Structure formats: C-alpha cells, structure tokens
C-alpha cells in the first residue's frame, strides 16, 4: 500500500483481521494478507491515527468442471477448452510438468494450446489463478500411429476386400481412408485394424494412398493399396 504519513505503522486491518507487516516507509506499507473471502476494507493504523479504507478483493480458487478434447498428440500444439468457475484471473495451465499460458474467454471458460508432453499417457491438468491452483482434470497424450503392413494390398476397384492393417498406436483410430474415400473399420487392438476397402470413386483401377488417423495424428502409406480391374470378356 502506498500513501502519505505511513511511517511507524502499528497495524493493517483487512476487515476484522490483522495483516503481518513486513516493510514500512513514510510512503508505503508492505504486508502479508490474512485469509478471507469477498471484499473487505483495508486500513492502516499509525501513531497519527487510522487511514481511510480501501477495498481488497479475495479471489476464490478456481473450480474446473471439464476439459475438451481430453486427448491429443504427444507433440502438443492442439487447442483445448477448459470450463469451470473462477477462471478470469488464470495465468497458467499445467499439463503434468509442462506449463502453457491460457487465453481467458470469461470467468467460466478459457482456451489453451497444449504444450508438448514428455511421453504418451495421462497427465494431471491444473489451472493457476490469483485465487490459487486447482486440479482434478486429466489429459492424455497419444503417440502418432505407424503403419507396418497392409494385407492383402490389392483388390477389385468395386471395393469389398477385407484388409488387415498392422502397425502401432491404433487404439484411438478415428478413420481409415483409401485415397480420399473413408473405409469401414474395426479396431482389433492397438496394433491391428480390420478394414473393408471402399470402391474407387470413378470405378477405375490404380494405386491408392492408405491413411490411418487417430487422436495422436495420421500415418499414410503412399500407394499402399492397388485397385485392380475386374475380368472382362
């Protein structure tokens, strides 16, 4: 607190509570505020009397009700939204040991660009505001997929070929495409996908890129599947 005639301060009150004075000059008083809630008047008492009151606002610790999306690439860079209350003074969001600076939308919402994770897996998420730090949310880093084999790697342009794709990090697969055409698929396990090839858009044969997309990113095999022409007489 700054002002005049503050030397020799004997007490600083936050409402009915007394603060601990840590430094004092004729023009300033530095204190450690006591606990409290809401808005309270602050006064300084010196041998010359008690000052006029000024308002001090206690800010409650933030409460987080949700985070979306709840997972993303281990490399980071995607944007998540955190909802809750008491977020207006947020200065940092912690993803495990990594920290990012948020963009505050309003007291109930903020967005933040996810920092890179140390490894795939879940980490705790906490928000730091003027009122303190609160945690209780979880974000999961997911490694990008890799594609090893496509078997069989050819079939008719009319589609309908049952294909097994092997690789890694398939658990969160969101789509499999042959060229630009999505294919129906089932996740067998983290290393295996069962896929049925779609028909080519124009019915013509030729190579098609095969792309597997997960919450951790995408993997593409250029010309990974070859559509062949059917017999003719």
Image (cartoon, rainbow, N blue to C red):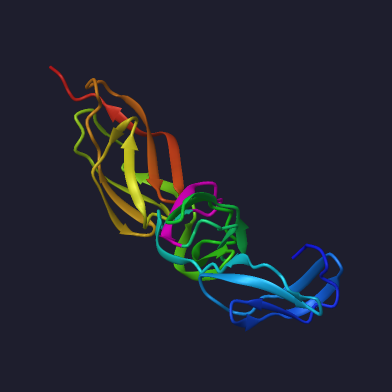
Residue 89 relative to residue 147: left or right: right
Q: Position of residue 190 (x, y in %)?
A: 38, 59
Residue numbers of the magenta segment? 73-85
Q: Nearer the viewer, residue 30 or 126?
A: 30
At 25% across and 20% down in the image, what residue appears? 204
Asked whether 81 falls inside the magenta stretch, the response is: yes
At 49% across and 66% down in the image, what residue appears? 62
Q: Position of residue 222 (x, y in %)?
A: 44, 33
At 44% across and 48% down in the image, what residue appears? 148
Name the quadrant containing residue 118.
Answer: bottom right
Name the quadrant containing residue 42.
Answer: bottom right
Given the current orientation, which residue lies at the most extreme left position? 233
Asked whether 122 falls inside the magenta stretch, the response is: no
Q: Position of residue 158 (x, y in %)?
A: 19, 29
Residue 106 relative to residue 205: left or right: right
Residue 79 relative to residue 206: left or right: right
């Amino acid at each position: 607190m700054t002002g005049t005639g503050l030397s020799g301060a004997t007490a600083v009150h936050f409402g009915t509570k007394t603060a601990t004075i840590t430094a004092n000059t004729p023009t300033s008083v530095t204190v450690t505020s006591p606990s409290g809630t809401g808005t309270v008047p602050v006064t300084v008492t010196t041998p010359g009397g008690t000052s006029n009151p000024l308002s001090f606002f206690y800010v409650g610790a933030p409460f987080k009700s949700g985070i979306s999306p709840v997972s993303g690439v281990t490399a980071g860079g995607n944007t998540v939204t955190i909802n809750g209350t008491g977020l207006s003074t947020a200065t940092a969001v912690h993803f495990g040991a990594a920290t990012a600076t948020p963009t505050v939308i309003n007291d109930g919402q903020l967005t933040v660009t996810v920092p890179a994770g140390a490894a795939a897996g879940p980490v705790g998420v906490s928000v730091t505001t003027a009122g303190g730090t609160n945690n209780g949310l979880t974000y999961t880093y997911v490694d990008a997929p890799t594609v090893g084999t496509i078997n069989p790697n050819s079939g008719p342009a009319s589609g309908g070929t049952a294909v097994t794709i092997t690789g890694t990090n398939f658990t969160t697969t969101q789509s499999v495409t042959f060229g630009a055409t999505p294919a129906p698929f089932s996740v067998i396990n983290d290393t295996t996908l069962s896929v049925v090839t779609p028909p080519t858009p124009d019915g013509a044969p030729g190579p098609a890129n095969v792309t597997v997309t997960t919450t951790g990113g995408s993997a593409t095999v250029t010309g990974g599947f070859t559509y062949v022409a059917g017999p003719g007489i």
